[in-house]
Image (cartoon, rainbow, N blue to C red):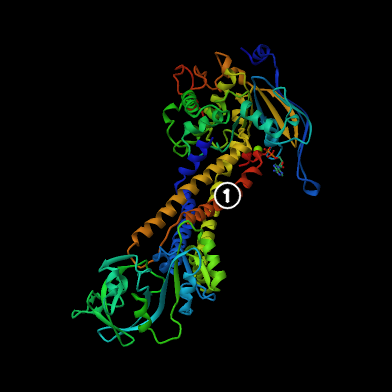
Amino acid sequence: MISVALKMLLRDKGKYFGIVMGVTLASMVITQQGSIFVGIMTRTFALISDMGDTDIWVMEPKVQFIDDTKPLQDTALNRVRGVPGVAHAAPLYKGILRVRLESGEFQNCNIIGIDDATLTGGPPEMIEGRIEDLRRADAVIVDIIGATTRLARRGPDGAPVPLAVGDTMELNDRRGVVVGISRNTRPFQSQPMIYTTFSRATQYAPRERKQLTFILVKADAGQNVQDVCDRIARETGLAAYTRDQFKSMTVSYFINNTGIPINFGIAVSLGFIIGSVITGFMFYSFTADNLRYFGTLKAMGTSDGTLLRMIMTQAMVVGVVGFGLGTGAASWFGASMSGTPLAFRLTWELLFVAGTAVVVICLISAMLSMRRVITLEPAVVFKG
Amino acid sequence: MTASARRAVQGLSVAVRCRQVVKTYGSGQSAVRALRGVDLDVHTGELLMLVGPSGCGKTTLISVIAGVLDRDGGECSVLGQDYAAMRPDQKTAFRARHVGFVFQAFNLIPTLTIAENVSVPLLINGVPRKQAVEQAREMLSQVGIGDRWRDVPARLSGGQQQRVAIARALIHKPKLLVCDEPTSALDHVTGQRVMELLRGVASRHDLSLVVVTHDQRIFEFADRVAEMDDGHIERISAGKGHTHAESPHRGFDAPPKNEHPLNPHAPQGSNEPNPEHRS
Ligand SMILES: Nc1ncnc2c1ncn2[C@@H]1O[C@H](COP(=O)(O)OP(=O)(O)OP(=O)(O)O)[C@@H](O)[C@H]1O
Ligand SMILES: [Mg+2]
C-alpha cells in the first residue's frame, strides 16, 4: 500500500510540486540565511582565527571581544612570561589609525603591531613579500582586500590601481612603506588591515601611557591549556582565554549587542513559518482532496495503521525532496557567491537545524491529515 | 445449478441474517431512525436487490451489512459472524478478506492506472505488488477491458469505469458484494451491461450480492427483490434473475444469454436480441 501512497502523491504533479515548494522554501531560507549569519559571525573573530598558533589570549579583564581594546601595562608581558607553563608570550598592538594615502586621501585602518623579535601573530598567508620584511625600515604589510579596494588609488582612466609593494603611506605623520601583501580571513569590519612591528605600531599610535593590547601565549608542550589560562589569571590578575573561548566570547558579544541575530532570526522564522503554512496547507488539501479515496481504502479493509504509514510516507517523501532541493539551492547560492564579499558558511549544524525544521513541518502536516483520515467514518463512501 | 442447489452444495445457506436491526443517526430532537427493525436474509450465491424510496434506509442497511457502520440493536450475522463481537481491527480485516464494494461514483483512485486500482484489495491483503497487478490485468480482461490496463480511470467511459470497479470488488474473491446504486450514474444500456456482468459474477462464485437500486429496469437481474420503506423491509418477491444465467430460452424482454458471463464483448448467439438496440 506504500506504493499506492507514493503514486497518489507523485502523480498528482501540481499538488506534489506545491507541497515540496513549501519544504524547499523553508529549508532554503533557513540554510541560506543561517549560512550568512554564521559567515558573518565567523568574520567577527577573523583575527583570532588568523593567529592560529596562539593557545591563549591574555587581556585586560574588562575586555569583552576582539575589537574591544583596553590596553595593559607594559609590565604585564613579563609577568605573564613568568607564569609556569607559559612557553612563550608575545605582545600585540591592535588599534585603528587614520592613514593618509599618496593621493592625499585619508582612510581608517586596523593596525596590528606584532612582536619585533619573533614576529608572532603575523598574517596567515603572504601573497607578496615575506613577514620578515617587516624588519626593514618603516615596513608595513597590507592585506590584499584593503590593497585592492579602500587603499587603491584612482588611475588615470578612473579604474582603481591596487596599493603595491614599494608604495608609501603616512600613519600619523610617520612614513610607512609597503613591503608585502597578505591574504587574511575577511574580517567583519571592512577597514583594511595593516601589519607592522609592535614597536613601530606604538610610534604610529597617538601617544598613550599603555599600548599593549593583547599578549599572545603559547603553552608549554604537554600542558593543559585551560590550566595555564587559570594560572595566568590567578597570578597576574589579567584575563586569559583559550583561542576558542575568545572566539565564542566575541560571537556572544555580537549576538547580544547587535541587531544582527534579530534580523537573521526574523528571516529564518519567516522562512520556517511561511514554509510550514504552505506545506501544511497544501498537504492537508492534498489529503482532503483524496479523502474519498482514503475512505474507500478504509471501507475496503485498509487498517488505520496502514493509512497512517501511507500518509507518513507521503510526508517523508516531500520532506526529503524539499530538504534536498532547499539545501541544494542554498549551497548553490553559497558556491556562486564564493569570492564575493558575501559572508556564507554552511555548517552541518545548520543542515541539522534545517532538517529538524523540515521534520517538524512534515510531522505537523502529516498529523493534521492523519487526524482527518482516522476520524473518517468508512460509511461515508456510500454518500454521493 | 439453481441458487438453492448451490446453497445446498456450500452447506451455508444464509450469507447474511438480519433480525430486528435498528440504526438511529444522531440523538434527541434531531434523531433519525434510519432502520427500525429490519428482518432480512441474503442467501449464499443469490443476487438480492434492495429497492425503495429515497431516504428509506437502503444505504444504511448495506453499510451495516458490509461492516462499515455499527448497528444500534438487533441481530446481524454475516458469513456466520457478528460484527458486534469483533474488535475494530478484526472488522477491518474481515472486510478486507470477505467483502467487496461497488459504489455509485465508482471511487477509483484517479492517479492510479486501472490495473493498479484493481490490485488494491490484493495489496490490502498482503499480496506482493507484481503478483497483484498481474492478477488485476487478468481480472480486467475478464470484465472485457484487458487492453486498457495502463490507462487512468479518467480516460475510460462511465460504464468502463464501473467495470473496473467491479473487477476491483471481485479480485480478492470476496463472499459478499455490496453495490450501492451501481448503475445510476450510467445510461440505461450501459447500466444493463454492468448488471449483466454482475449477474454473471453471481452465477459463478459462491458469492452473495446485495444491490441497492432505484432503477426498476434492472429488477429483472435479481434473484429476489426486497422492498424497503421507512426503515423496514416491506416485502420480498422473487425476481427473474435465475432465468438470465440459467435458462437457455428467455422472453423477449430478457437480456441475451451470454456465453461469457463476465465478458459482454464475447461473441453472442446471432438470434439473440442485442440489448443495446432494445430501448
Ligand atoms: N450520517 C447520517 N447522519 C444523519 N442522518 C443520516 C445519515 N445518513 C443517513 N441519514 C438519514 O437516514 C435516513 C436513511 O438514509 P439512507 O442514506 O440509508 O437512505 P437511502 O435509502 O439510501 O436513500 P437514497 O435512496 O436517497 O440513497 C435518511 O433519512 C437520511 O437522511
Ligand atoms: Mg442511498
View extreme (left): residue: A156
Residue B110 visible here = no
Vertical position of residue B163 compared to residue A46: above or below: above
For label 1, being within 8 Å of ligand 1 is answered no
Q: Quadrant of ligand 2?
A: top right
Dot 1: few (<14), some (14–19), or many (≥20) neighbours within 10 Å? some
| Left or right, A47 with reference to B175 | left
Task: Locate residue B179: give its quadrant.
Answer: top right
The residue tagged 1 is A363
Depicted B57 relative to depicted A174: above or below: above
Residue B226, by quadrant, is top right
| Residue B63 coordinates in the image, percent (x, y) | 68, 34
Residue B28 seen in this snapshot = yes
In this view, A139 is above or below B240: below
A310 to the left or right of A179? right
Count of numbered marks: 1
Residue A276: x percent and y percent?
54, 56
Position of A74 with respect to A136 (left or right) is right
* Residue occupying the far right of the picture: B28
Chain designation of label 1: A
| Residue drawn at (63%, 47%) of the image | A371
Is disc 1 placed on a helix, strand or loop? helix
Residue at 52% across / 60% down in the picture? A274
Percent coordinates x, y for residue A172 in the rendering: 34, 86
Residue A347's x, y, as percent? Answer: 45, 56
Q: Quadrant of the N terminus of chain B?
A: top right
Mark 1: amino acid: Leu
